[in-house]
Amino acid sequence: MNNHFDKQKITFRPLVAGDLKLLFKWLRSSHVHEFYDKDKEITLDNVSRRYLPKIKGEKPTDCFYVLYDNKPVGYIQKYFIKDWEDWSNILDYDDSVESIDLFLGDKSYIGKGFGSLMLSEFLNQVVFVDPKIKLCVIGPEPSNTRAIHVYEKVGFKYIKTVRLDGDTEDTYLMELNKVNSDKK
Ligand SMILES: CC(C)(COP(=O)(O)OP(=O)(O)OC[C@H]1O[C@@H](n2cnc3c(N)ncnc32)[C@H](O)[C@@H]1OP(=O)(O)O)[C@@H](O)C(=O)NCCC(=O)NCCS
């Protein structure tokens, strides 16, 4: 089912401290928690402790609200694998490779084609706008078949299954080359 959304109405804006309450609300909702930060205890304090340093630029992750028609409906973050030990201990990617994580916070948007559209727009509007970035990486859990299907639809290809340091679940590693990203 694809779709009645106007991609020109999808925008991304950096997260600010005032967004943390809504982020907390989304992270603790069951449809998100099932697949995102599921090993974390979701309290407002914890969410602030983990996301505020990223918002302030003290931790090397860029956080964005996904807006539809100026209304926040989801979250995406991007970062370099080489900057995070749990990833870089097992994966050797340089600074031409960015990784992303995402979810739709507003449940009413799920399963209507919005997730695929917001991901391809984020790649086009944000990730691959930087000429340095040649490859994007994403790592759903193997059991998250909906997310895997969406990432395949957008053009990501399965590489291998890995286990990051400290994780209790495997990561189903997928890659998208910049040269292939505009063919979807
Ligand atoms: C993953 C997510 C961003 C996808 O967004 P979405 O708007 O729900 O996805 P879309 O509607 O664009 O596409 C869903 C696709 O998956 C398919 N699908 C739905 N449930 C599925 C399942 N259990 N297994 C496989 N495919 C499934 C749909 O048929 C559709 O494919 P189609 O367009 O070929 O018919 C969103 O569902 C989400 O935020 N989920 C909760 C958090 C999460 O999983 N985040 C990702 C962490 S890696």
Image: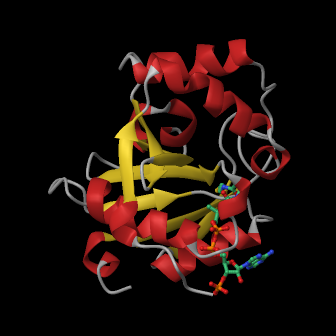
Image quarter in which the C terminus is found: bottom left
Closer to us: 128 or 26? 26
Residue 110 in picture, x, y percent from top left: 69, 65
Q: How was this image coloured? A: secondary structure
The image quadrant of residue 21 is top right
Residue 7 in picture, x, y percent from top left: 38, 70
- Residue at 63% x, 54% y is 104
Q: Which residue reaches farthest left?
A: 131
Residue 40 in picture, x, y percent from top left: 77, 29
User: Is residue 101 among what the camera can see?
Assistant: yes
Q: Is residue 112 left or right of residue 28?
A: left
Query: Does 129 appear above or below 56?
Result: below
Q: Is residue 31 left or right of residue 161?
A: right
- Residue at 14% x, 57% y is 131
Residue 60 in picture, x, y percent from top left: 39, 28
Closer to us: 115 or 11? 11
User: Is residue 91 among what the camera can see?
Assistant: no
Image quarter for ligand 1 equals bottom right
Q: How many numbered marks, from 0 up?
A: 0
Q: Is residue 166 left or right of residue 176?
A: right
Image quarter in which the N terminus is found: bottom right
- Residue at 78% x, 26% y is 42
